[in-house]
Amino acid sequence: MGVYFFDTSALVNYYHLETGRSKVVALLENPTHSNFISRLTLVELHSVLARKVRTNELTEEGFHTVRRLFYADLRARKVRITPLEQGHHLQAILLMMKHGLSHNLRTLDALQLATTLEFHQKTPLDHFVCADAALCQIAHRERLAVLNPED
């Protein structure tokens, strides 16, 4: 059984044809895997999909179809949500202080990583699945096993 924590950058590959989609599909559809996301991903996924509509990569109908599929997967527990808690904000600040001066660590990425690291302390992860090269590099520096499906 594998335990995987998905960043939004990788999860979106499951719902929209992107580089690395086959790797994400293989992970999420493996019945022996436990797959997790941060509550933050709920908002980020909508943001990514809305941007794809604005840039004509996805139709408005496609946006609503993907939303339905995503929520069906949540109900089926293909992906489980971990909470975003107040302590994660402090951890994100610490990550920003540690990495933000020398690496491109964005606010929401710091929160995602803080959530992932805290989850990993309680439930060891096989991989943090992320398609954002900058975030992958920082996660690796934090000693997470990182899988970038686009590599």
Image (tube, rainbow, N blue to C red):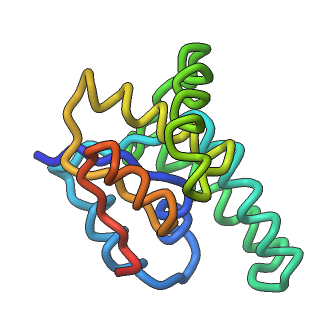
Quarter of the C terminus within the rendering: bottom left
Q: Please determine whether, in this image, residue 35 is positioned above or below residue 103.
A: above
The residue positioned farthest toward the top in the image shown: 86
Q: Please determine whether, in this image, residue 100 is positioned above or below residue 8.
A: above
The residue positioned farthest toward the front in the image shown: 101
Q: Please determine whether, in this image, residue 148 is positioned above or below residue 58.
A: above
The residue positioned farthest toward the right in the image shown: 54
Q: As rendered, which of 151 and 57 lies closer to the eye?
A: 151
Q: Tell me the residue at 64%/55% (across/down).
A: 68
Q: As rendered, which of 32 and 106 lies closer to the eye?
A: 106
Q: Is residue 50 left or right of residue 17?
A: right
What percent of the width, then of the height, locates residue 28? Answer: 33, 59
Q: Tell me the residue at 49%/60% (across/down).
A: 11
What percent of the width, then of the height, locates residue 85? Answer: 57, 17
Q: As rendered, which of 117 and 4 lies closer to the eye?
A: 117
What percent of the width, then of the height, locates residue 51? Answer: 81, 69
The tally of labels here is: 0
What percent of the width, then of the height, locates residue 61? Answer: 80, 72
Q: Tell me the residue at 38%/50% (across/down).
A: 139
